Image (cartoon, rainbow, N blue to C red):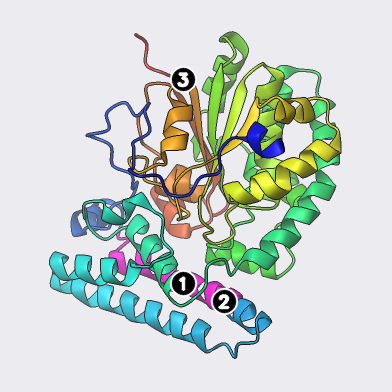
């Protein structure tokens, strides 16, 4: 069956596990940017208040999506307003407690707010290391679920998936028109950047989407020129052209719609063309407009089979392209707390790809692996752009080849 060919979409396993190819799991720190006073002095004045503002600005989009979801089921929007008020209270409490330097109270406040029976994240029990992006994502998603919003972006995800699937044949034709391997690689990398603009968790890109902008073709045509703010494309190209094709790639994917369908699927297809098995690792539980493993298996891969593509269809049929649930329920990821299924798949992988600002920049940008690793995303927060010496909508492709043995 298609489900069998696509791998196991599992609920939370009995115990968490770390990604097996972390260079040193004991030294691994998931978050890229610290929110401490020391970090503020070192990073040009981007304070904890400014990071909390990033979350505050995006709350409008979450409240609006929650209200739409509630009203669609006959509600009056009161639960959506209650979520917004609750998150605002946590943000305000975090500001005050940060000023007071009360780490114990910060931990209690955020962890209590994040608790939800609908959570499946193994990282809920992770040791406290201070207020950061990962902790605030946990709070926001936990509050949504505790207010009854399991997947309030479901409608927009469905609509964007349908639109992207209609566009996919022309995107693949554009890739195939490039006879040169290096040209095709650049084409699909640029496609990854263009697709990644569909991110409703960032206020800037959400506003762009709401105003009818940010479509795939125009974004791809107007990408910032190289060099990008983190630009290891030449190292990636050298490995791609001169090295042995990878045996197996684990691809942690990000958003629904253009991101996964027009960005990551063509990249996966190029890997398949080279003889590489590809495992798409997606969230176990909905978060923002991120694609889930269930959505990939139930909706996206069947549509790809129906497309009749000579690379994708056979790969799905024989399991060379398959899906596994990561165990995550957030738009960021802590690679110490993954599902047993993805850990087992990754044991013989020789390439890991972390895509999206949450998984590849705000967490894991500097994570070290014992295998080839790529982090790829478009920057949609001004604060992140500043810290990486770039601009809003700048591009990141970080490629770290496996250490020589």
Few, some or many C-alpha atoms within 10 Å of disc 3 (few <14, some 14-19, many ≥20)? Answer: some
Question: Which dot marks residue 348?
Answer: 3
Q: Position of residue 51 (x, y in %)?
A: 36, 64
Question: Which dot marks residue 144?
Answer: 1
CA–CA distance between discs 1 and 2?
8 Å
Q: Nearer the viewer, residue 164 or 393?
A: 164
Q: Earlier in the sequence, mark 1 or mark 2?
A: 2
Query: Which residue in the protein does label 2 denote?
Result: 66
Q: Find out whether the residues at labels 1 and 2 contact each other: C-beta distance under 8 Å.
A: yes
Q: Position of residue 186 (x, y in %)?
A: 67, 29
Question: Which dot marks residue 218?
Answer: none
Q: Position of residue 341 (x, y in %)?
A: 46, 36
Residue 355 located within the stretch drawn in magenta = no
Which stretch appears magenta?
Answer: 45-65
Quadrant location, the C terminus: top left
Few, some or many C-alpha atoms within 10 Å of disc 1 (few <14, some 14-19, many ≥20)? Answer: many
Q: Which one is in front in this view, the residue at disc 3 or the one at disc 2?
A: 3
Q: Tell me the residue at 41%/39% (across/down).
A: 365
- At mark 2, the secondary structure is helix
Q: Does residue 162 appear in this view? A: yes
For the stretch drawn in magenta, what is the main secondary structure? helix
Q: Tell me the residue at 59%/20% (across/down).
A: 237
Q: Is residue 5 left or right of residue 372?
A: right
């Amino acid at each position: 069956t298609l489900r069998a060919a696509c791998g196991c979409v599992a609920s939370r396993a009995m115990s968490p596990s770390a990604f097996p190819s972390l260079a040193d799991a004991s030294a691994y720190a998931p978050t890229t940017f610290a929110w401490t006073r020391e970090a503020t002095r070192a990073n040009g004045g981007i304070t904890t208040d400014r990071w909390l503002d990033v979350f505050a600005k995006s709350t409008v989009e979450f409240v609006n999506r929650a209200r739409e979801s509630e009203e669609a089921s006959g509600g009056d929007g009161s639960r959506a307003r209650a979520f917004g008020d609750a998150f605002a209270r946590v943000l305000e409490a975090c500001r005050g407690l940060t000023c007071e330097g009360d780490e114990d109270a910060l931990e209690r406040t955020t962890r209590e707010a994040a608790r939800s029976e609908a959570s499946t994240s193994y990282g809920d029990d992770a040791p406290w290391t201070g207020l950061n992006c990962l902790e605030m994502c946990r709070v926001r998603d936990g509050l949504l679920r505790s207010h009854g919003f399991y997947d309030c972006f479901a409608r927009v995800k469905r609509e964007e998936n349908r639109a992207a699937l209609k566009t996919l044949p022309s995107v693949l034709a554009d890739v195939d028109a490039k006879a040169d391997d290096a040209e095709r690689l650049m084409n699909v990398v640029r496609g990854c950047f263009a697709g990644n603009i569909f991110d409703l968790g960032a206020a800037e890109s959400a506003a762009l989407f709401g105003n009818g902008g940010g479509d795939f073709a125009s974004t791809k045509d107007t990408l910032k020129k190289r060099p990008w703010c983190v630009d290891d494309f030449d190292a990636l190209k050298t490995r791609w052209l001169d090295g042995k094709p990878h045996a197996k790639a684990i691809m942690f994917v990000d958003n629904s719609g253009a991101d996964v369908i027009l960005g990551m699927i063509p990249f996966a297809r190029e890997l398949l063309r080279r003889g590489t098995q590809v495992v798409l690792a997606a969230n176990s539980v909905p978060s923002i407009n991120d694609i889930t493993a269930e959505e990939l298996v139930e909706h996206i891969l069947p549509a790809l089979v129906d497309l009749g593509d000579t690379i994708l269809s056979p790969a799905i049929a024989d399991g060379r392209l398959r899906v596994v649930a990561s165990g995550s329920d957030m738009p960021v990821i802590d690679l110490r707390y993954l599902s047993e299924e993805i850990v087992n798949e990754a044991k013989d992988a020789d390439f890991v790809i972390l895509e999206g600002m949450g998984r590849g920049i705000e967490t894991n940008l500097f994570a070290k692996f014992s295998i080839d690793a790529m982090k790829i995303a478009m920057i949609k927060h001004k604060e992140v752009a500043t810290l990486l010496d770039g601009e809003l909508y700048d591009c990141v492709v970080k490629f770290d080849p496996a250490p020589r043995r």
